[in-house]
Image (cartoon, rainbow, N blue to C red):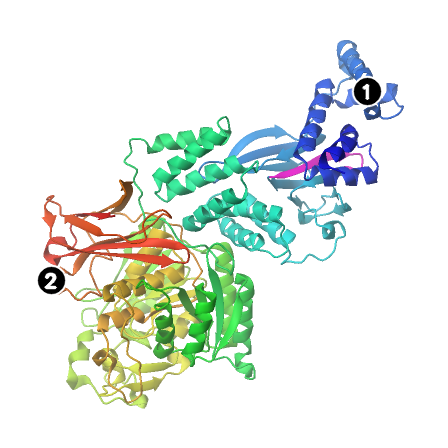
Amino acid sequence: MTGHDRCEELSPLLFALLENEVSSTERNELTAHLAYCDPCRGALEDERRLSERLGAHAAIAKVSSAEEPASPRFRFGWSRAVAAALIVAALLIAPALMDAPRSYGAIRHGTLGVSLTWEDGVHEALARANHLDIPAGSRASLDVDGVGTVTATGPAVFELDKTPSGWKLTLLAGRVAVDLGGAGKMQVSTLHGTRLLSGGAHRVTLDPAFVADAPVDPKGFEELLARGMTAFSKSRDARSASMAEAARLLAWAANHREASDRDRNHARFYLVCALANTNQLDAAHTSVRQWLRDNPTDRRRSYALMVQVSVLARMGKFESARVSAQELKREHPNSNEAARVAVLEKAWSGSGVVSRAAPGTSTLRARPGAVSGGYLVVATALDPKRPEHADYLSVAKRAAAFHHAEVVAWDGKDVGRLTKEIRQRKPENVLLVVPPDVLDVNLHRAVFKIASSQDDDPCADFAFGWFTARDGIGIKRLWKRTKRLHQKGLASRRWIGSSVISGRKSLVIGGNPSRAVHALGFKGEQLWCAEESSDPDVRAFVKRELPRLEGAGVITLVGNGDPQGIWLFDDHRNADASTHWPFDPAKVGHDPKDEMPRITAEQFRKLNLDGALLWSGTCHSGATHRVFVEGDIVSTFGKTETQAIYDMPPKESLCLAFLDAGATALMVPIASNHGMSVSRESDFGVQFGATLGEMIKSSWDDALIEAGGPLRLAHYVKGGAPSYHRQHIMRGSAANRMLIGDPALRPFAAAALPGETVVTSRSNGSIIVTVDWASGFHSWGWDMYGDDRQRDWRVMTRVPLEDDDPKSFTTTGTVSGEDGKDIPCKVTAVVEEYHGRRYLHLQANGPRVRMAYKALKAVFTAK
């Protein structure tokens, strides 16, 4: 039987379905057919409208049923005329018989606007009988008085009717969420049967398991999609945690092995919007283009084209956005989406098209087969036979399940084996779960070298983070906090900074001066802890004020120090040989005259830093056990002519203290570094809406681009020569920057940094990037990893490339100062290939005396 034959067979039953006059067999057949037949759903709606025109009031229904109790009206053509006559007569001679329309609640409609966020639409009264056909890009929330709420995101078709026994919901297509009050009840019917729901939250699907009240598989496609759609529908704005959760669940559902092509397209449709709303613009662009290619005739195509226009505009690709807008208006000239895009286009005209904040980032949570690249968990130096490793292995498996990734075991020694795994899997994010006594600078650098050698461009080819804690209890708590941050976002919008200063008294500055803080709208303050030489009361100040860190969502710490503490004494002591003693593990921290006060691990451990992200620029503050002693910590560790090792007890470790106190992620150095990295990484994270892994990667990439490729890094060996004899000191410090935490965590939405504007345009085959920096501090201004001391100041940026841009470029650039005069500069341009996305890194170097802290304008032309 053809689909057309089936329509002809079932169409006479449509009116009966509205009147609830079909048998259970007929209802099941109709429901199954309507779920996939647009014409019949349209005919059903026509039948409903006809009934409403004839009169659908309760009194009229009573008159009709009293005078015509015979066979159902839908069986005979003449019965509809009789019913019409009866209703007309009743309207003319018996208005008193008509009950006034009654409201049983409210229906609130909403649509996804061109901004891809929910916009309120029409509100109407909830009637006794309600039929809703929710198209893609729309949602409806039905507030049922005294019962609860029904929420649906389109496409979905369902009926909600009040019967003598209570409210009844009939799901014909899609999925709905039902949230019933304590005493609320609702009968739900699908083509598979009927189920009575009582108080609580329920996700109603067409899965046979739903009506059977069978245990729900939390990883089954229907449950994942229903949860994802519920989270998306409840999202009030782009930054809400439920939008991030929607992106995660919808991406999982879109790649689920149980999903049909139809279901996969449904998940991907809303995934595009969720990705865009969580500022994952590159991934959203890739996904919507694929969706449009795969669905040339889908009725949701007009909305998908509008989404594509919006995403391209956000990315600064205005010419491409205009092309997509023309395609939308050509294919769907009379659609609401075309009208909305026309309004958006007016905002571009004559504006110069400014893209502030360089856009484009990877997806929220990568997984194998998803649009963003893969995720890999590496169980590092973990022995299943050792009881103390059991919790670390358990967390590795939980993390892999959460990210839908695989776990591979690595002994932490065979670098070739890990390199092979990485090359085969090509992950975008790697999480290495490791016990604290194994993690050291050599292990970190081994993975860093793998990350920077996977392709021909100099940039790192994946982001990675270490996952460790003092013990099994600590690692489980760390994962719990990590999962919470993924699902709910930062618990606090306070951003607290602490720095060590000299030449003045300690003080608390109200209002954090960081550009990133202002860009995000966070609140907070800055603690300036003075060296004891200028503030004899600094120890009391720290004891009194350090608890201000509690309750902060983000913490930044800058100050000289060592693995055990942040120094409150003059670091020039490092250069005073008369104060040094030969290295002896028993004398580490030796301070018989009490001349070297520090903010120690124990002081941080006493704090409650639950859920905080913590940046530290204190050297070696990422060390957990094995410390390679060098000249930068000679004041507190002692002098050594060769490479010495100190096996630090866990209670002395700053790093483990931060984690014990409840931090969720640490961006820290495992050996020496420069504290400026803290400002640079946090600025990068805010400007690009980056993941934590990408933030750390930005430090690596800066050094790699300066070096033009892989870094020459020292391997630390006990008794060997100090590392500074065998590597570029500053670039080696960039490689020492590391993440302890999940590299896929994305804590911030992208925001323009104050005082910086980036404009990208395309003309005659050229890409023109104009960067304006206002006078003042810019964290990336100093070329920290370069060798040219005559041109050690710069203007730099990173812009995303479009698919049709050339593979390589010849790039020129100019820099002008406040006076408009050109400043001689050297231009560097690097194209980075990164998991299906391409970026153009640009910088122009010039003399410090003419560029430092001054207003600058750089214009780059790549062709």
Which residue is farthest right? 70
Q: x, y percentage for residue 501?
A: 22, 65
For mark 2, give the secondary structure.
helix
Judging depth in this view, the residue of 212 and 788 nearest the camera is 788
**Quadrant location, the N terminus:** top right
- Kind of residue at disc 2: Gln
- Kind of residue at disc 1: Gly
Let me know if residue 507 is in the magenta part. no
Let me know if residue 163 is in the magenta part. yes
Judging depth in this view, the residue of 838 and 695 nearest the camera is 838
Q: Which residue is identified by label 2? A: 790
The range drawn in magenta is: 155-166
Residue 348 lies left or right of residue 275; in this view the side is left
Residue 491 lies left or right of residue 626; in this view the side is right
- Foreground disc of the pair 2, 1: 1
User: Quadrant of residue 705 in the image?
Assistant: bottom left
